[in-house]
């Protein structure tokens, strides 16, 4: 008959066995009948009973011995006793070996005559058969039992049970340790058996309890229990005992990775800094003179210039640099007057046009191409100021780019803009360094010219546009014209100098502003990047319209995040000059908005 693996109850059929398991064990809370273990699945409980309570299970299932009684009698033979003493001894020995269970059959049966007794032919065959039956029952039960669920993450260190909860595993381990304590405290026969077994195996009678998680040997089961509980409590799962070495190795590898990352970051920053130095002309690769000479040498090597022309241009360049005056090769004059004639004749879509005073256009040449826009816009401003009587203290001629660099260094020497001087290491001559609005302000201050920096530091219109910039430029030019006439004419050429306009990577000069019939504003810009032959097209009425379209910049054409404008507003007194130089230590611009 089938026997329940959990409660050892015998059932008449397999169908009733399944019903019994469903009603008694699966639908109710699963609990071990031999200990307090509960809250586990059927498979886990069956596996637990087969491993932790195998001795009790075998004791409860000795009823199966009766079924094999006939086979056991075959191990006994009839023998006539030679004496009563021998018979008594055999009977006593036999009584010790016979189970007293009422369900078991005795291995020996006494006849009525008492002349025959049953004697076991081999003394150890009964023990071997019993052990084989127990082992066979254990194997058969383990075959019927399914393995624990794989989703459990806590395995018993003393058997193969896997539990889902660490508290259930703790109770299970405590049962193991209690069984071991009971085995230690058994009678002298158990002690003798243990001692004999340990002696036969060549081991010491003192048992060491080894932790299955870290291989630590504990002197007693209680200390092992506390040690295992520490593992379960703090989640230590080191199976090799080398966690400290692993942690040290991990930290070392992490430090090596961080060191490599820092070195790579340092190399990258150094390369980026060199690129920036080269971009802004601070890489000591030479200034205006060296770039001009290299450009002419390349032209000779390509056949674009004959050697005689090369030497002639080189001599002219050296003479210009020695005098400190610009050679005028990139200058175009008469442009503002030509614009005034164009607007008076052809600008039908303009309601008002305001132009600056007469200003020469200076284009970038072979010596400053790619970095000289700031110097060229400064030359444009000076060319306009030279035509005004109030600025007669300024140098008569327009200086060359190396001379402008020297003027900026002189301004730094007077104490103007110390932060800018530190940025350029107090040196501009012989370099291709870019300059901006602060350098223009510093050199004008050193020349006693009153200048103002206006910073349009963020867009003020939709689409990253700057309508406030356009309004400010209109106010700058129209304010002077409104003083003369209450109703200004359509085209007004003011007496104001152009405005220096700086943004990231480039600078231009604002020479005028248009106001369309619909009210939109448009700036007119002189760009140093435009070649002289292109600018001369403004002087012709046939090509002026094309060039004016290139000079116009509407609000949608100026979308850099930040713009800085430098406007000249007169001369400085000596006291104002000293005050401005002193205040330039912490240079502050007027911000709009």
Image (tube, rainbow, N blue to C red):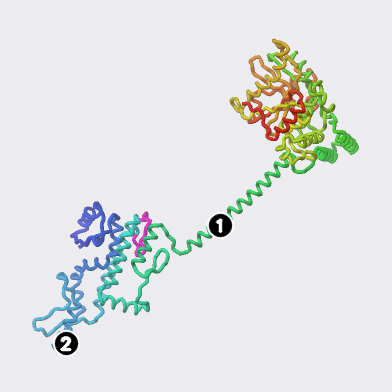
Disc nearest the viewer among 2 and 1: 1
Q: Does the magenta stretch include residue 80?
A: no
Q: Where is residue 348 in the image (x, y as percent from the top left)?
A: 70, 13
Say what secondary structure mark 1 lies in: helix
Q: Residue 205's x, y, as percent?
A: 34, 76
**So how many labels did they put on this image?**
2
Rendered position, 167 above or below 289: below
Image quadrant containing the C terminus? top right
The 10 Å Cα crowd at callout 1, few under 14, some 14 to 19, many 20 or more, is few
Left or right for 9, reference 359: left
Q: How crowded is mark 2: few (under 14 residues within 10 Å), some or many (20 or more)?
A: few
Q: Distance between the residues labelled 2 and 1?
A: 82 Å
Which residue in the protein does label 2 denote? 86
Q: Which mark is residue 116?
A: none
Sequence order check, earlier mark of 2 and 1: 2
From the viewer's side, name the closer residue of 146 and 269: 269
Q: Give the range drawn in magenta.
A: 149-161
Q: Where is residue 44 in the image (x, y as percent from the top left)?
A: 31, 58
Instruction: Estimate the x, y position of residue 515 in percent, counting from the top left.
Output: 67, 17
Front residue of 200/104: it is: 200
- The residue at the point 72 percent across, 11 percent down is 485
Question: Is any part of residue 529 visible from this angle?
Answer: no
Q: Residue furthest front?
A: 575
Image height of 266 relative to 522, above or below:
below
499 above or below 200? above
Q: Which residue is drawn at 34% across and 55% down?
A: 165
Secondary-structure class at tag 2: helix
Residue beneath label 1, please? 253
Which residue occupies the extreme left position in the image? 112
Q: Residue at x 76, y 24 (%)?
A: 571
Q: Is the magenta stretch mostly helix, strand or loop?
A: loop
Where does the N terminus fall, quadrant-wise? bottom left
């Amino acid at each position: 008959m089938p026997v329940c693996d959990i409660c050892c109850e015998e059932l008449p059929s397999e169908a009733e066995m399944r019903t019994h398991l469903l009603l008694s064990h699966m639908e109710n809370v699963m609990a071990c009948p031999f200990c307090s273990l509960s809250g586990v699945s059927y498979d886990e409980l069956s596996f637990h009973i087969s491993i932790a309570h195998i001795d009790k299970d075998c004791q409860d299932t000795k009823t199966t011995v009766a079924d094999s009684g006939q086979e056991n009698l075959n191990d006994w033979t009839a023998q006539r006793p030679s004496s009563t003493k021998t018979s008594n001894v055999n009977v006593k020995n036999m009584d010790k070996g016979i189970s007293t269970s009422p369900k078991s059959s005795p291995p020996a049966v006494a006849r009525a005559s008492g002349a025959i007794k049953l004697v076991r032919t081999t003394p150890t065959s009964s023990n071997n058969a019993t052990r084989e039956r127990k082992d066979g029952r254990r194997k058969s039960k383990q075959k019927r039992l399914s393995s624990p669920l794989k989703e459990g993450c806590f395995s018993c260190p003393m058997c193969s049970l896997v539990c889902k909860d660490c508290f259930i595993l703790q109770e299970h381990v405590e049962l193991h340790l209690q069984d071991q304590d009971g085995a230690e405290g058994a009678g002298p026969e158990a002690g003798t058996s243990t001692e004999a077994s340990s002696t036969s195996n060549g081991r010491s009678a003192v048992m060491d309890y080894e932790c299955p998680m870290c291989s630590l040997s504990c002197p007693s089961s209680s200390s092992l229990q506390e040690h295992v509980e520490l593992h379960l409590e703090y989640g230590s799962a080191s199976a090799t005992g080398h966690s400290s070495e692993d942690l040290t190795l991990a930290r070392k590898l992490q430090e090596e990775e961080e060191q490599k990352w820092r070195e790579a970051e340092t190399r990258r920053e150094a390369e980026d800094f060199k690129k920036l130095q080269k971009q802004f002309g601070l890489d000591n690769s030479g200034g205006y003179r060296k770039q001009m000479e290299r450009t002419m040498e390349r032209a000779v090597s390509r056949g674009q210039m004959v050697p005689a022309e090369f030497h002639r241009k080189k001599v002219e360049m050296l003479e210009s640099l020695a005098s400190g005056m610009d050679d005028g090769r990139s200058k175009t004059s008469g442009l503002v007057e030509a614009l005034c004639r164009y607007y008076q004749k052809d600008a039908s879509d303009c309601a008002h046009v305001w132009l600056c005073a007469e200003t020469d256009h200076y284009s970038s040449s072979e010596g400053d191409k790619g970095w000289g826009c700031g110097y060229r816009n400064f030359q444009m401003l000076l060319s306009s100021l030279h035509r005004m009587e109030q600025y007669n203290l300024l140098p008569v001629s327009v200086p060359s780019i190396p001379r402008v660099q020297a003027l900026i260094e002189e301004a730094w020497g007077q104490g103007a803009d110390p932060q800018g001087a530190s940025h350029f290491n107090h040196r501009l001559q012989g370099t291709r360094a870019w300059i901006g609005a602060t350098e223009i302000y510093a050199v004008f201050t050193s020349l006693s010219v009153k200048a103002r920096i206006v910073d349009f530091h963020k867009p003020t219109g939709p689409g990253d546009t700057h309508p406030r910039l356009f309004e400010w430029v209109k106010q700058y030019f129209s304010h002077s014209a409104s003083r003369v006439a209450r109703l200004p004419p359509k085209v007004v050429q003011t007496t104001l100098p152009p405005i220096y306009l700086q943004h990231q990577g480039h600078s231009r000069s604002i020479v005028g502003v248009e106001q369309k019939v619909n009210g939109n504003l448009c700036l007119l810009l002189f760009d140093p990047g435009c070649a002289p032959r292109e600018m001369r097209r403004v002087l012709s009425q046939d090509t002026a319209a094309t060039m004016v379209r290139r000079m116009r910049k509407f609000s949608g054409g100026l979308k850099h995040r930040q713009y800085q404008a430098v406007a000249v507003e007169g001369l400085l007194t000596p006291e104002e000059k000293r005050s401005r130089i002193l205040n330039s230590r912490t240079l502050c611009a007027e911000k709009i908005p």
